[in-house]
Image (cartoon, grey):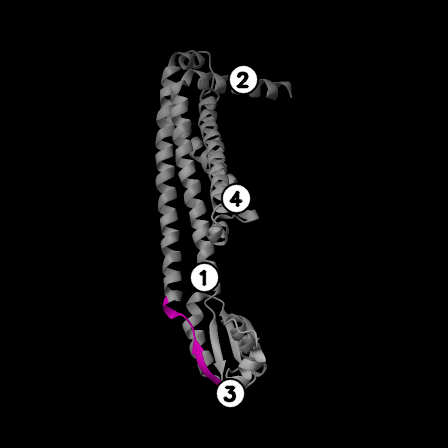
Amino acid sequence: MLKAFTKADYLIRETLLGLRRGGWMNWAAISTMTVLLFLFGVSLQASWQLEGLLNQFGSQLEVSVYLDSGVQADSLQATVAALPEVTTVEAVPKEAAWQELVTDLGISDIAGATEQLKGNPLVDALRVKARQSEAVPTLAAQLLNLEGVNEVLYVDEAVQRIQQLNDGLRWSSFFVISVLSLTAIAVITTTIRLIVMARRHEIEVMQLVGATQIWIYLPFILQGTFFGLVGAGVAWGLLIGIHQFLYEVVNQQPDFIQFVVNGLRLTSKQTILLPSSLLGLGCAVGLMGSLVAVRKYALR
């Protein structure tokens, strides 16, 4: 137990000593990591927000099935629900549809409006949601062939656009993460190499007294991890500050509150995943940069 404590104490002291001697190079590494992780956090949030908007829009791309006059929606609900591409089916009786339409038009006298038109002019309908956006055209064709179905409406072009945007978003996120990671690794590698060169005389002495390569260069590896941790913490603080600022601005713009707040609000899972992703990427990039930096000297 005492031996482990002594080793940990040595690693901490050597890591702090290296950071203190690094001087402005430490701040260069930390500031670069902060900027890169901040941009990564922004891009990650943007990806989540866009995916949320796409999913919200995609959930509204339901197939509207209008039945023949006299056909009850309940009579076809079970048949439609049995189709493999269908997730949910909502029966809309013509009475409910008529009441909703009249309410939307701002007419308070529903009975009077019905009497003027000599009855309810609408028909029963079904609101069907597909399992996947790609299945909407096929599902619409199947529904149109059912007996008692008069018309089927859906937004074909919007379905295709949603799929294209999802694919583009996936590749764009991968490209951004790759570029930011490579840039951060290069910065950390350069910084650690400069620190190693500044302490080369101490390293030579340790090698002469028989210290192992791992024991010599482990503090430098911990320094790179430290850069990632600090950069992730600062980037997370900046993201929180921007969120608070945007919420205050939104509160002064009532016309846009619903849209903007819903777009910026993170789920409980995303609230945990965002700082975890920043810490994970920061530590991974810092560790990778440190390993690349010390590898050249450790193999001598």
Question: Disc 4 on helix, strand or loop?
Answer: helix
Judge by depth and name the residue closer to the eye, 242 or 35. 242
- The mark found on residue 144 in the picture is none
Q: Which quadrant of the figure contains the C terminus?
A: top left
Residue 118 falls within the magenta-colored stretch:
no
Kindly identify the amino acid type of the residue bearing the numbered disc 1.
Answer: Phe
Q: Position of residue 238 (x, y in %)?
A: 46, 35
Residue 155 higher or lower than 181, as above or below? below
Residue drawn 54% across the image and 83% down it: 114
The reply to whether dot 3 and dot 2 touch (C-beta < 8 Å) is no
Q: Which badge, 3 or 4, is on the more N-terminal residue?
A: 3
Dividing the picture into quarters, in which one does residue 290 lie?
Answer: top left
> Disc 4 marks which residue?
273
Residue 153 falls within the magenta-colored stretch:
yes
Measured in 3D between alpha carbons, the distance from the residue under mark 4 to the one under mark 2, in whole angstroms, is 33 Å
Magenta-colored span: 148-157
Kindly identify the amino acid type of the residue bearing the numbered disc 2.
Answer: Tyr
Q: Position of residue 161 (x, y in %)?
A: 37, 62
- The mark found on residue 10 in the picture is 2
Dividing the picture into quarters, in which one does residue 202 lie?
Answer: top left
Q: Which badge, 4 or 2, is on the more N-terminal residue?
A: 2
Dividing the picture into quarters, in which one does residue 23 lie?
Answer: top left
Q: Is residue 82 visible?
A: no
